[in-house]
Structure formats: structure tokens, C-alpha cells
Amino acid sequence: MAYVISDACISCGSCAGECPVGAIAEGDGKYEINADACIDCGSCAGTCPVGAISQG
């Protein structure tokens, strides 16, 4: 199951740089994870300073 970014996202971008497959991009008001590209590695979740990323 792909990771998701909640509304707690502060749009800092730290997660996007950690994604090995480039599945994270800036969306409307927060970053978003492309579920089809996500490989469920969890690299992004460990870098989020506000804990906005979890396995969906």
C-alpha cells in the first residue's frame, strides 16, 4: 500500500528529495505521492519534520 501525505504537510519538500523513484511532487497546498509510482520504501516518512506521511 502506497504512502500518503496528510493535510499536516507544511510543503517543506524534504520528502521529495528522499524518494528514490521520484513519486513525490508539489501539489495544491501540500506535497502528494503518486500511488502508482510509490514502491512503499518509507524513505519519505522518516524525513518529514511534522509526521505528515504514513502508509495509506
Image (cartoon, rainbow, N blue to C red):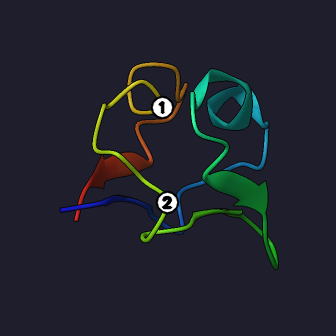
Residue in the picture at 34% in, 45% down: 39
16 displayed left or right of 3: right
Seen in the image, is 47 located left or right of residue 13? Answer: left
Q: Which residue is mark 1?
A: 44
Image point (60%, 52%), residue name = 23
Which of the numbered marks, if any, corresponds to residue 37?
Answer: 2
Where is residue 4? Give x, y as percent. Answer: 39, 62
Instruction: Kindly identify the residue that appears in the image at 82 percent across and 79 percent down.
Output: 28
Q: Position of residue 36 (x, y in %)?
A: 44, 71
Where is the C terminus found, in terms of image quarters? bottom left
Residue 55, position as x, y percentages in the image: 22, 53
Circle 1 crowding by C-alpha within 10 Å: few under 14, some 14–19, many from 20: many
Q: Give amino acid for label 2.
A: Ala
Extreme residue in the bottom direction: 28
Q: Nearer the viewer, mark 1 or mark 2?
A: 2
Measured along the vertical axis of the image, is residue 8 above or below residue 46? below
Q: Secondary structure at mark 1?
A: loop
Q: Say if 47 sits above or below 37 in the image.
A: above
